[in-house]
Image (cartoon, rainbow, N blue to C red):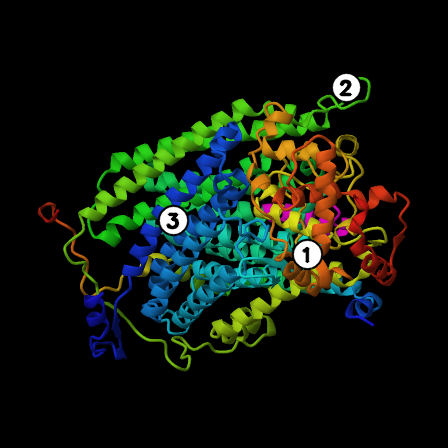
């Protein structure tokens, strides 16, 4: 660092052919920091993944402690690999390439370091709060509101630093990799802010301002674009910089890369609804999502081909150079997952794949193959340059490549077959027209061999990760006592643009158009350009989202649907804290094999008070949308205490702490108040939530004793859980002829009076 | 009257089609511009930018084996 600052302070006196050249150096210290963070969090995130893979193969790996149960650790795994591993990898490559492509040191070393340490602090906060059960229940946006605020602050610091560097750049043309970075930075900020709008009910609890269909729509607009703008566009930017570097030749077609960029930016933002096919989402939205997803296939494959053909004339090097091997497999994995993504978004394919492990296989092709291998290739390419020595072991790189490749194949093949197997079992009817596998757990047990194969494949990938880490540390140990900080020279951009070769306006209209001088002026204003692009993205998103929010006919209300009672709300919050939604959907799709198995299909109007929505995305256990009244209260008590006592071979973690931990009755009031603030008509409950909850708890506890169960549960968490379970799906069961009404007023007043009446479940 | 009532009566559905046409138009314009013959030279130069970022006055000396 010290030599860096002295280099930066060197006098800008040097002159070449009349242009004063700036002398400066690049900040590689922060790149080295991000590189180590990538390694450390990669190992942590993948080990968490291994643990939850073991938990699915055998529930003893939940260790009977609430802090290590699958529902709490699964978001830890996804957040760690997405935001900690892939995030830090993106920052590593972005800080290295941005400075060089713009011929400028990062604008502020202070902001670079703030970004680094702030991001790591956020990751630590996530790793602490998720096992403690603080979650918003939205996939990849689980972190609670104080951490969300911190993310916004750190991201803005990164953006300010980045855009100021862009303004101070010394290279007129902004290379396409930088475009991908810009799109990522801007879009992630927008997505993060809008999806996390919520009303706090305490330091680590909040309720989404959106409910039901709107919340689902918002979440998957976020969720899909988190994949797009956190895992795809940043890594495409890295691809367009580091692949030409490693191949020692320019990208195959720069024009294609421009089209790749614009078509992704235009299309990705619309694709989110394909996560909600056949749910209570309006049909038109689901169709728009499918069409745009299928269209995305073209630019994605254009980009993949562009990446692979960058190696034209360098294919002989691929055999010798492990870095190029990582890139080739990484880009191929991008091609495979972007073929599969559009395919999965086709409704009929989605009907089979949704809620199954197929989706898990799909994301792991992307995460392990694309993000992982691009990161490994990039880091191996960076190591000699950042640590100014040779890589410690090239053979270890080879070994890492092969063991990780075989690991991916084992993982993905096993989990694909698990997904298709379970999907087919769910929909199978026997010759008498009844479900062939009516017992849900049967369709889970069938997957066990595949789950163990996943453990093997995943472990191989992690072994590769340790080899990677060993090689990095060994290379780092060979670094010079003092890093050389090369001084770079480049001419500053003239304050007013001076054409090097002034253009004589062409005589014809087409000629002048073809000279594109009219467009040059826009290009000289990257910040204005960014602002306009951002507005375009927001407007496009609003056109997609607003109709479901504001046009009432899109979400018909159902008069019999009432808000949860205070006790049920407390139970729902426990359901959220335990991460039950990671394994149990609450969304019966309108297929005969679903309604036969679970009951009446779910309606949009049923989730108007669901802040946040809990439709789920994976069924490791059965759907719970119609769980209420299916079993006696005591069944739930026994089942929570030890699922295997009720369902042999169930892989659900046990929740014995529900029977011992006291329920915080006094805390319920602030939660009801927060729910009332986001628009749930709570009526009487806004004044006496705790009393109402105690009253309902006493009744349920008495019923449990009557059924021959344990006494003394009336002040335990178990009561709230049972109350919530027994309420699920009851609103339309109670009154099957409930008329669908387009007017909200009648339903709202009816709901307000009904809020105090315990929802009719007890 | 709530905002959602106003929006419901505002007949906004045509705007989504207008937005689609606008976005498609912009995209076509970008495509045409990218393939204009006059831009060829500029884009070829741009493609070489990643390979052209070592304007170094104190070049990195390659490490000799004794340095290790």
Residue A435 in sight here: yes
Nearest the viewer among A195 and A176 is: A195
Answer left or right for A614 relative to A172.
right
The kind of secondary structure element at disc 2 is: loop
Residue matched to label 1: A690
**In this view, which residue lies farthest toward the front?**
A712
Q: Nearest the camera: A313 or A32?
A: A32
Q: Secondary structure at mark 1?
A: helix
Query: Disc 3 sits on a residue from what chain?
Result: A
Residue A209 seen in render: no
Q: Is residue A726 magenta?
A: no
Which residue is at 52% across, 43% downward? A72
Q: Which residues are magenta?
A: A278-297
Q: Is residue A328 above or below residue A747?
A: above
From the image, tell me which residue sits under label 3.
A243
The residue lying at 49 percent from left, 38 percent from top is: A65
Q: Name the secondary structure under disc 3.
A: helix
Query: In this view, which residue lies farthest toward the left?
Result: B66
Residue pointed to by mark 2: A430
């Amino acid at each position: 660092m010290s030599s860096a600052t002295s280099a930066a302070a060197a006098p800008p006196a040097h002159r070449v052919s009349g242009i004063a050249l700036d002398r400066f150096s690049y900040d590689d210290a922060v790149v080295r920091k991000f590189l180590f963070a990538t390694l450390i969090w990669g190992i942590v995130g993948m080990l968490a993944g291994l643990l939850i893979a073991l938990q699915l193969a055998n529930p003893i790996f939940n260790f009977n402690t609430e802090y290590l149960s699958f529902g709490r650790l699964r978001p830890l795994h996804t957040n760690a690999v997405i935001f900690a591993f892939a995030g830090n990898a993106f920052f590593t490559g972005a800080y290295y390439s941005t400075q060089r492509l713009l011929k400028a040191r990062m604008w502020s070393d202070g902001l670079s370091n703030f970004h680094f340490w702030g991001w790591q602090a956020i990751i630590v906060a996530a790793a602490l709060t998720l096992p403690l059960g603080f979650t918003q229940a939205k996939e990849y946006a689980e972190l609670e509101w104080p951490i969300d605020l911190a993310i916004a602050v750190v991201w803005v610091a990164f953006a300010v630093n980045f855009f100021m560097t862009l303004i101070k750049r010394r290279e007129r043309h902004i290379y396409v990799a930088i475009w991908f970075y810009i799109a990522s930075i801007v879009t992630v900020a927008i997505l993060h802010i809008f999806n996390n709008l919520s009303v706090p009910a305490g330091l680590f609890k909040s309720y989404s301002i959106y409910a039901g269909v709107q919340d689902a729509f918002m979440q998957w607009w976020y969720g899909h674009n988190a994949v797009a703008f956190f895992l795809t566009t940043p890594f495409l930017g890295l691809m367009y910089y580091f692949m030409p570097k490693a191949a020692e030749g320019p990208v195959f077609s720069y024009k294609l890369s421009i089209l790749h960029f614009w078509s992704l930016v235009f299309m990705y933002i619309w694709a989110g609804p394909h996560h909600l096919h056949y749910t209570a989402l309006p049909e038109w939205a689901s169709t728009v999502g499918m069409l745009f997803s299928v269209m995305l296939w073209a630019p994605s494959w254009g980009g993949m081909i562009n990446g692979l053909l960058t190696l034209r004339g360098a294919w002989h090097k691929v055999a010798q150079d492990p870095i190029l091997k990582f890139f080739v497999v990484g880009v191929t994995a991008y091609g495979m997952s972007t073929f599969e993504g559009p395919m999965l978004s086709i409704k009929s394919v989605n009907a089979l794949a949704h809620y199954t492990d197929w989706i898990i296989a799909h994301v792991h092709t992307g995460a392990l193959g694309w993000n992982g291998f691009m990161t490994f290739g990039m880091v191996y390419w960076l190591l000699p340059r950042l640590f100014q020595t040779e890589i410690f072991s090239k053979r270890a790189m080879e070994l890492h490549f092969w063991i990780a490749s075989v690991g991916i194949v084992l993982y993905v093949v096993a989990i694909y077959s698990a997904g298709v197997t379970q999907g087919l079992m769910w929909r199978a009817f026997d010759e008498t027209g009844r479900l062939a596998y009516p017992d849900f757990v049967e369709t889970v047990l069938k997957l066990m061999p595949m789950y163990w194969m996943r453990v093997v494949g995943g472990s191989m990938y992690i072994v590769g990760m340790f080899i990677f880490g060993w090689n990095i540390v060994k290379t780092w140990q060979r670094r010079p006592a003092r890093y050389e900080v090369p001084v770079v020279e480049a001419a500053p951009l003239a304050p007013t643009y001076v054409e090097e070769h002034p253009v004589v306006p062409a005589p014809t209209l087409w000629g002048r158009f073809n000279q594109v001088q009219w467009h040059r002026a826009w290009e000289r204003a990257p910040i204005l350009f960014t602002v306009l692009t951002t507005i375009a993205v927001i407007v496009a998103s609003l056109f997609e989202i607003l109709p479901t929010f504001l046009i009432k006919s899109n979400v018909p209300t159902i008069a019999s649907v009432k808000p949860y009672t205070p006790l049920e709300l407390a139970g729902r919050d426990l359901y959220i804290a335990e991460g039950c939604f990671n394994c149990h959907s609450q969304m019966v799709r309108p297929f005969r094999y679903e309604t036969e198995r679970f009951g009446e299909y779910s309606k949009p109007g049923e989730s108007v008070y669901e802040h946040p929505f809990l439709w789920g995305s994976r069924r490791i256990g059965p759907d719970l949308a119609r769980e209420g009244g299916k079993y006696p209260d005591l069944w739930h008590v026994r089942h929570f205490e030890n699922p295997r006592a009720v369902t042999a071979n169930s892989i659900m973690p046990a929740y014995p702490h529900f029977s011992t931990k006291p329920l915080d009755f006094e805390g319920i009031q602030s939660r009801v108040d927060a729910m009332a603030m986001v628009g749930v008509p709570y009526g009487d409950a806004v004044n006496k939530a705790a009393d109402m909850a105690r009253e309902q708890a006493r009744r349920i506890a008495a019923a449990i004793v009557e059924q021959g169960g344990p006494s003394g549960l009336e002040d335990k968490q178990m009561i709230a859980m049972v109350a919530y379970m027994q309420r699920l799906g009851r609103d339309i069961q109670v009154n099957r002829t409930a008329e669908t009404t387009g007017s909200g007023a009648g339903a709202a007043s009816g709901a307000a009076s009904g809020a105090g009446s315990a929802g009719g479940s007890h | 009257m709530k905002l959602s009532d106003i929006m419901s009566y505002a007949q906004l559905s045509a705007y989504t089609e207008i937005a689609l046409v606008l976005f498609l138009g912009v995209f076509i314009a970008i495509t045409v511009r990218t393939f204009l013959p006059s831009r060829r030279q500029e884009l070829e130069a741009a493609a070489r930018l990643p390979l052209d970022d070592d304007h170094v006055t104190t070049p990195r000396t390659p490490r000799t084996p004794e340095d290790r």
